[in-house]
Image (cartoon, helix red, strand yellow):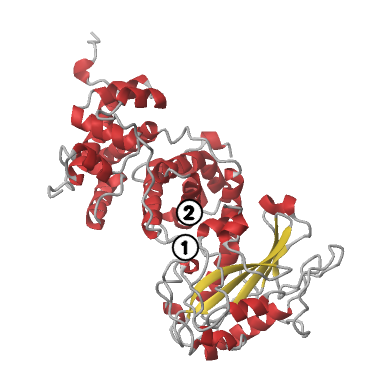
């Protein structure tokens, strides 16, 4: 289309149709936006066109999937909460060591950590809960390297992005397996980052690349927004993303929060938040910094969902946020299909 | 706040000013339409739902970018289309299309229109389009075919198909506007 459609002309209708279809270049879109701001007639024409397309496509007459409204509400509540609830600093993590992996009887009492932000599980899952579950926010943590935390690009973007949106922010990125990093001390991500993997922007739907040079299975990562949103893990994922943007002292906070996750008091029902932490650390290619953990019941099985952050490159800042879900009893990692019940 | 009495534009302003209930009302009003837009795009309710959620998350985060030149519903339409397009591109997944009858040499406008239960005004406006535009609009808007597939079927360039579709939309909007607001020349003399 070489004609100048961005000045008033009889072709305005065609121009506006292309505009609504998202078929204009950025420059032409900007020109249309400028005209809309100063030409009410053009704006009315655009409204009429949008109304026409709504009628033509019958978009107001579709049947919503069962549970759609509830899932949307839960997702938005997750986003809202993540936007307004500051992540808590772990002020006084318990001094006890990591708790034994177990799923304790539901009658076991558990105290909520005083320094954690606690919220109920989404309503959508509440009927399934055999044991009450809570979200324990253990706070922000810093990047693996001192420099560059505030200047992340790529994998840690805002999930909303421009009007078109970013997909799942850093959580959509894949793991680039680096078996040699598996012994990286959890509490010192900066040291581990010197050996960390590349950014791994290749999309990962359900599983990572096989670890190189190791017999360890790949680490399934619930990496796509679809799976995360269905399980209402959006907030958890958002917390990991927020960790990427932290400007706090990275080394100190990472160490403190890693310890806090490891030592966090049990969930109601006695489930230890760190029950599968060793496995997450062991299986992940490169240093992993846990940000938060959530317990949930899916189909009668208790799962632990870990929000983790990882550096994008050796010595680089934390740039990838992920949610990794494991069966709480066996610590077997679960892929998106298993979690969402897809075939 | 009685949601039905408040305009969308008022609601979005109220939300930007901090009224969360206003946002909830907008979601209630538009959750079906946004899903419908995304469903038309992806032809898959799972992907459509994901995209619809992202649209509302975007609305939540970027409500202040609504300039208010056109209606809120128009702006949300664009946000939805752009979101679907963006998600599809990121997933490197082409939108799925519906199966067409093998003998669909000529668009079955009548059956398609009947199936969609378009109202009389819209039906008449469609029939007023020239044949090329009508075929393009029917294929694209009623059958959901992508431009490239229509171009292949019609033996023309993709740009030609787009032009026909966009012109068709423009003409349809004009026809409908004329029916709502007859021109002075069409009006009976008032004495």
Is mark 1 in CB contact (under 8 Å) with mark 2? yes
Residue extending furthest toward the front: A215
Q: Name the residue under label 1.
A: A159
Callouts 1 and 2 in the same chain: no
Residue A243 percent across, percent down from the top left: 55, 75
Mark sitting on residue B60: none
Residue B88 percent across, percent down from the top left: 39, 54
Tell me what residue is drawn at x 12 percent, y 47 percent. A3
Q: Is residue A210 above or below residue A9?
A: below
Count of labels in the image = 2
Q: Is mark 2 on a helix, strand or loop?
A: helix
Mark 2, other Cα within 10 Å: few <14 / some 14–19 / many ≥20: many
Q: Which of A6 and A178 is in front in this view?
A: A178
Q: Is residue A82 above or below residue B111?
A: below
- Direction from residue B68 to residue B31 in the image, left or right: right
Residue A121 visible, this orientation:
yes
Q: Nearer the viewer, residue A92 or B11?
A: A92
Q: Mark 2 points at which residue?
A: B54
Q: Nearer the viewer, residue A78 or A38?
A: A78
Dot 2: chain letter:
B
Mark 1, other Cα within 10 Å: few <14 / some 14–19 / many ≥20: many
Q: Which of A67 and A336 is in front in this view?
A: A336
Q: Tell me which corner region of the image, top left, top right, bottom left or bottom right, holds residue B128.
A: top left
């Amino acid at each position: 289309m070489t004609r100048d459609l961005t000045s008033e002309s009889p072709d305005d209708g065609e121009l506006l149709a292309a505009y609504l279809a998202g078929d204009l270049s950025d420059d032409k879109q900007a020109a249309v936006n400028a005209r809309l701001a100063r030409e009410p007639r053009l704006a009315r024409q655009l409204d009429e066109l949008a109304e026409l397309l709504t009628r033509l496509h019958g978009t107001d007459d579709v049947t919503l999937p069962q549970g759609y409204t509830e899932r949307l509400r839960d997702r938005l509540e997750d986003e809202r909460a993540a936007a307004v609830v500051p992540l808590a600093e772990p002020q006084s993590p318990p001094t006890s060591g990591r708790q034994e992996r177990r799923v304790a009887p539901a009658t076991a009492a558990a105290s909520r950590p005083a320094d954690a932000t606690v919220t109920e599980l989404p309503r959508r899952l509440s009927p399934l809960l055999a044991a009450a579950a809570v979200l324990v926010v253990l706070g922000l943590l810093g990047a693996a390297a001192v420099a560059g935390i505030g200047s992340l690009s790529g994998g840690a973007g805002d999930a909303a992005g421009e009007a078109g949106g970013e997909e799942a922010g850093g959580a959509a990125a894949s793991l680039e397996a680096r078996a040699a990093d598996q012994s990286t001390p959890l509490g010192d991500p900066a040291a581990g980052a010197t050996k960390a993997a590349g950014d791994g922007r290749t999309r990962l739907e359900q599983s990572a690349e096989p670890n190189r040079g190791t017999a360890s299975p790949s680490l399934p990562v619930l990496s796509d927004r679809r799976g995360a949103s269905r399980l209402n893990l959006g907030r958890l994922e958002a917390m990991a993303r927020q960790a990427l943007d932290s400007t706090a002292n990275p080394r100190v906070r990472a160490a403190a929060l890693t310890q806090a996750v490891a030592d966090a008091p049990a969930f109601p029902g006695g489930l230890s938040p760190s029950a599968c932490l060793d496995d997450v650390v062991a299986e992940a290619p490169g240093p992993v910094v846990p940000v938060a953990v959530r317990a949930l019941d899916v189909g009668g099985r208790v799962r632990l969902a870990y929000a983790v952050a990882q550096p994008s490159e050796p010595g680089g800042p934390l740039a990838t946020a992920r949610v990794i879900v494991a069966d709480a009893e066996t610590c077997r990692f679960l892929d998106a299909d298993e979690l969402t019940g897809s075939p | 706040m009685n949601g039905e009495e408040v305009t969308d534009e008022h609601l979005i302003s109220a939300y930007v000013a901090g009224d969360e209930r206003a946002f909830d009302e907008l979601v209630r009003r538009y959750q079906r339409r946004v899903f419908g837009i995304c469903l038309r795009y992806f032809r898959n309710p799972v992907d459509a739902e994901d995209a619809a959620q992202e649209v509302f998350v975007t609305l939540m985060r970027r409500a202040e970018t609504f300039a208010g030149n056109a209606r809120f519903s128009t702006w949300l339409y664009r946000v939805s289309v752009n979101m679907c397009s963006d998600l599809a591109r990121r997933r490197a997944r082409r939108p799925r299309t519906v199966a067409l009858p093998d003998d669909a040499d000529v668009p079955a406008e009548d059956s398609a229109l009947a199936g969609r239960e378009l109202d009389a005004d819209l039906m008449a406006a469609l029939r007023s389009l020239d044949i090329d535009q009508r075929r393009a609009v029917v294929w694209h808007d009623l059958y959901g075919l992508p431009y490239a597939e229509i171009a292949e079927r019609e033996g023309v360039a993709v740009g030609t198909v787009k032009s026909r579709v966009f012109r068709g939309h423009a003409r349809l909007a004009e026809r409908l506007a004329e029916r709502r607001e007859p021109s002075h020349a069409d009006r009976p003399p008032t004495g």
